[in-house]
Amino acid sequence: MKKFLLLIICSLVTSVFGQKTASGLLQNEKKEPIPFASVTIKGTSKGVKTTILGEFKISIPDTGNVSLIFSSVGYEKQEVLVKGADPLLVTMVQVSKSLNEMVLVGYGSASKKELTGAISKIGGEELEKLNLSRMDQALQGQVSGVNISTNSGSPGGASSIRIRGLSTFGDNDPLILVDGVVYDSEGLNALNPSDIKSINVLKDATAGIYGVRAANGVILVETKQGRLNAKPKIELNSYYGFQSASRKLDLLNATEYAVIKNEMFAFGGQNMPFNNTALGVGTNWQDSVFQNSPVQSHNLSLSGGTANTRYSLGVGYFTQDGIVGGPKSHFSRYNARLNLSTDLSKKLKLNSVFLFSNDYRNTLPENGIGSVLYNTINAFPNEPINTPDGNYSYLDEVSDIINPLAQIANQYNWSWADKFVGKEELVYEFNENLSFTNRYNYNYSQVQSKVFSPLAWFGPGKYANTALNAALESPLVEIAPDVFIERGASVNEERAGYTDQTFESYLNYDKTLDSTHRIKATAGVSVFQRHGEALGGYAFNIPNNSVEYADISANLAAGGFLNNVYSWEFTERLVSAFVRAEYAFQDKYFASFILRRDGSSKFGPNNRYGFFPTFSGAWLISEEPFFKVKWLDYWKLRLSYGVSGNDQIPNFSYRALLNGEGVYVFDDVLTQGVAIGRPSNPDLKWETTGQLNIGMDLTFWKKLDLTTNYFVKNTQDLLFQPEVTAILGSYGPGGYPPIINAGDVSNKGIELELGYHSDPKKKLVSDINFNISRIVNKVTSVPEGVDYIPGAAFSVGGDVATRFEEGYAIGYFFGYETEGIYQTQEEIDASGIIQEGAQPGDLIFKDQNEDGKISFSDDTDKTYLGSPIPDFTWGFNVNVKLHGFDFSANIFSAVGNEIIRNYERQQPYANQLGYVIDRWVGPGTSDEHPRLTTGETRNNVFSSYFVEDGSFIRLKNIQIGYTFPKNWMKKAKVESLRLYVAANNLLTLTRYMGYDPDLGSPNALSAGVDFGMYPQAKSVMGGIQVTF
Amino acid sequence: MKKNIVIVIVVAVSFLHAGCKKFLSVDPPYAQDAENYFQTPDDYDRALTGAYDMLQGSFVSFWIGEIASDNAIAGGESVNDSQGLHQIDNMTHGGVNIELRNIMRWNYTGITRVNYIMENKENIDFPGKDHIIAEARFLRAYYYFELVKFFGDIPLIVDKRIGIEEARQLPRTSKAEVYAQIESDLVNAAAVLNPVASQKGRATQGAAQALLGKVYLYQEKYTEAAAIFDEIRNSGLYSLIPNYADLFSASNENNSETVFDIQYSGLEGGSYGCLICLEGNAAPGFQGIRQYNGPVYGDGNSYNLPTAALYSAFSAIDQRRGHTVLDIEAFIAAQTDPASISYAIGAGGHTGYYNNKYIKRQGEIGLPDNDLTSPVNYRVIRYADVLLMAAEAHYKLGNTSLAQQLLNQIRVRAGIPGISVQSINDIYKERRLELSGEGHRFFDLVRTGQAAQYIEGFTVGKNELFPIPQVEIDLTGGNWNQNPGY
């Protein structure tokens, strides 16, 4: 058994009429406050509960020795003798680490013990340790049921956060609230992960307290706060690191290229392009494009508190150059933060948060046809980077492949954002049971961008040319008959401002009626408005074709012709009311009911308001008297069901547009009238999700926590523009169908989190977490008249390769299935299947409809080829501490997803991957890679040949640190000093051939399509953490 | 205190609730769309033009009026081309028919465009608004009349646009109720509209009265029909033009015999992909002589070909025969150099005859487009039609002598002697001779109960109405019963 620790610090106590007051703070071993614990006077039934900050105040008789008994589920009961008048500092020992952790549940908090929903919480320190610039990157692999894939590995690149699968082909992003302020995926660049205290992920229907915005899950982020009665603490946290490409593709060198191209041309009946194939290795384009680049981060913070004020403030700086393009692919951020809580009076408390950020980003064309890496992969190795005259080489033979270095050199693309986010919150506590919160949240961001397009010449006939010729002369534009003006270098600037304002007002009630009943209730209203507006312009003829003058103000466009301005503006609003009622019986049975009503300006007048109810309950079996299993300390069953919505549909979609044609002939003259094109849909509403969750939480041997959930999530009312009834009158000239709610998607899954937490007082402290999730995604219906929604195209102008179709996962791959390679003409003849144009060495396509013929003109022989959605994702985190040394590792893995290899430009001269060396060259030479030819072939249509297993296991972060002994540091007046080395993405195990198998897309129908993804860097860092 | 706070919350919530509606109806800033239109008189006028536009899709209805009857066959390049028309020709049509679907879609679009104006008719007041509303009502009556002729009971939507949910709730409204709405619109329109149009092409008082009379006649309300036709006759605004030959040329349009025409222009081209987008009349090109190379006519697609039975229904001295039906071989033989003239026969059928009222003629070919852009108007109601309808109504009311007098005005203009009217069939027969090729025949046969007698394959109790396209039944949730027999 452990010894209870009792610490007493000084202050005062007042004695009044034979009574005195005992007060103090109840905390756990991590010095975190323990709220809602009961404090009773020994031998009486008189007692109070600790506040949310773990504080208590209780009147005790002024006679003799009084003992207080502290109890809270998940902690061992503790008895403390009140000695003297000093406030007590009571530390309780946990039975289980996580049970008493407070979790944000939306307009309130709850301990894990009383949770009825599926909510996961990650502490800020766990994210900060990963040394990543964005919260979403850091969250990857940390939480079950949350799959995060990287949209771009470039500095400042976003990730896709998918909580419990994809529920729409529209917007699948969860609602992210930072101290109550909405952040979108793009806006996360402004959030410094070092400022985060905790991240709470609401996965199941209990997120329904956020109603129409909750269907994709809700992430509640709180920023760091100070602590009462704590002396100022200054923390410095810095690291510096180098990044490099973790992987390069196996591309042909010049000699291999020449040999292979000669064969290809010969096969195609053309002259061989290379008389001499001994070209050495030639140009390694990847080596010239990838570079090592620095990353650094510095955070300084100050936190502490007095008797009635808590404060935490900080400043931060982060900067990172890209491994492609260096400073032209760059991200940097300045942050300032203030979080202040103060008791204005005994009952009135002010919480104030202010976050400022300035972030700046440069980008290159990425993740698409024509991106820098796409050009790098396809550039010919026999071509030098520069011609002898010093110009970039032209890569003449293919018009849509340009010299990637010339491309980088001519790319000027900036964007920067200033963001002011804040909260002013007044909490009035009537008594210990009832509080009234009023708050105003704001988020103002100004987003600016500038693109400079100099006159550039990439070679004759190149699509990217902006100049007329190699001498960089301006093209001429005819603005009136025979009037020509020059169109020189141009600049596009845009200033967009967004203002979000939220006013929220709610009551929280929490009362333990007697030892058996506890009631909690929350009721309130919320009003939200977002307003955005932008002004932008294009200006031409920038002087000297130089970036030095890249501003609209400098333009020399004759008479302003060609110059252009544009603007836009929008407003959206949300008005909501919500209640949550919770009831606990004997701290064993928990029930909760949530109802939210949302009204949104996005929806049609007939469906402007929605009700979103949720029921949930839990049963703490381990508290039952009949339950007596020694090794099982804690066992809770949870159940929830509720309905929530996804309001992320375009504004004004319900409104009719006057884009129809209405022309009639009056007096023999064609007379323009007006007609509705897309009709209104006054019934337009949110996408609706019903979610069932069955979960279980267990603690074994006081050290091992297990949480598991099974869920079924059905989404309906997706937005389509299908055929509609004639009586809506939308089939006139220029008519379109209205946008309507139709189509269903289902996600079913199981998730498991396992945590081992060793005894923190032992020398070797270890903390091991494992989580695994499986999600099965399926489109369950599409509206009549819609066969499927087409997604991404394969290759340049190729077939649609991904679809949203009933019976399949969202964005599944659809094409021809291959069955090896025809080795001989006899084999083709004997196959009994007519595959037009097939020759020995060609891919064998499977005759799906068994009609004896491979049909290339329709879809009848195409089939399911894979899905970008993994069968499983898992994460593994380990932290070990021993004698001041600490070690941590973080692994993330996705299993069973497929990726389309779509970065090969299928042109005769384009460079190719090394696998073509193993191509078919005669009977028996290959049953995998087909022959190469410039002649007509079906080998390049979209087939399973281009679909690869995208499974991977990645060591996301590994770190070794050393914290100097306290007694050494004391002399230097340093509280603590830690030095560490860390590495990100050191190791990735995958069979995927491309740069990076961690491949996401904001568009659900383009996930898993690799155009030459900008890969995540491998980085090695050294860091220091000092606390004063 | 606790109580006070609860009161504050309750008040706040109810205030929010009340204020919500306004707070949430956000207009797109600085943008005009259909929800914030109708701010100026011009806005109404433009929307009305949009509502007129849908008249131009009426050619399908006229085709079916001929092809479904004994007057014409479908024709065309093959029986698989415009399959829907061939099925109707053979009375084998069913729930899958693209032509019938177009009828339904286009007329409901016209109705929707009118309802869009009517929904907003109280937005502003200005002189002349009543006239715009009256024209709109005329158009809505026209579109509903088309639908009720084809499909019988149809969902009635008045003065509002509907959403997808409401569409699923709407039943088929009874024919009688639809007719009542049509009558009410036309009575209102006739009371307001000018006797003479301010612009050529706009609906007039006479047009509304004539359409109303026709609607009465379809319901066998002979007294009302006769009265309104007499009003038109007594207005002195209309007369038969002397020469039947001049009736269908582009150059002689909007004459004293014109009660209502659908206006077309030859100035804008189009594509086969969107026939409803055309500003020209598609019918003359479609009905033209296939691969014709010769004088007078232009080459076309040999649709809607008159039958030999129609040709032989005319007496040889009837001037109307040649101007209604073109006997192609006779025409070629009469030319100075017949050998130089050639044409082709489409696999969709050939009778040797062409619709000579609406046919592609040299000099009437649209400028930008040879096939789809004819400037020739469609004659919806001619005064001759009014006289024949008046004759029919008066005959039914027992006024045989007036009926005979009206009928003989028509015969005299056609260059044939008057007759003594012995039976209603004399009037029906004259109606066919005068108006064939103009899209009336099938509906006349149905309303007079003669369809089974004249149309091969016509099933009584079934073919009086066309089937509602099955897909339209499905798209509204399957609540509508199909018409009997389909």
Image (cartoon, rainbow, N blue to C red):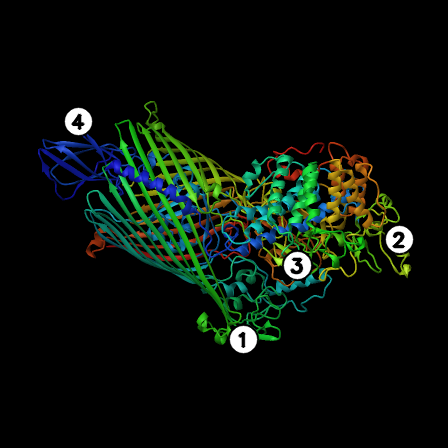
Residue at numbered disc 4 = A43
The reply to whether the C-beta atoms of the residues labelled 2 and 4 are less than 8 Å apart is: no
Check disc 2 and report its element: helix, strand or loop.
Answer: helix
Which badge, 3 or 4, is on the more N-terminal residue? 4
- The residue closer to the viewer here, A982 or A377, is A377
Residue type at the position of mark 1 = Gly
Circle 1 Cα neighbour tier, 10 Å, few/some/many (<14 / 14–19 / ≥20) = few
Q: Which residue is mark 1?
A: A390
State how far apart marks 2 and 3 are (Cα): 38 Å
Q: Are marks 2 and 4 on the same chain?
A: no
Q: Amino acid at mark 2?
A: Glu
Chain for numbered disc 3: A
The numbered disc on residue B329 is 2
Q: Looking at the picture, how far across and down is residue A371, in whole percent?
A: 54, 61
Q: Earlier in the sequence, mark 1 or mark 4?
A: 4
In the picture, the disc for residue B33 is none
Tell me where residue A336 appears, x and y as whole percent: 31, 57
| Left or right, residue A681 beside residue A935 | left
Q: Secondary structure at mark 1?
A: loop
Verify CB contact (< 8 Å) between mark 1 and mark 2: no
Determine crowd level at label 4: few under 14, some 14-19, many 20+ residues with C-alpha closer than 10 A.
Answer: few
| Tag of residue A667 | 3
How far apart marks 1 and 4 lie (CA) works out to 93 Å
Mark 2 Cα-neighbour bin, 10 Å: few <14, some 14–19, many ≥20: few
Tag 4: amino acid: Gly
Which of labels 1 and 2 is toward the front?
A: 2
Quadrant occupied by the N terminus of chain A: top left
Subunit of label 2:
B
A355 displayed left or right of A858? left
The crowd level at tag 3 (other Cα within 10 Å; few <14, some 14-19, many 20+) is few
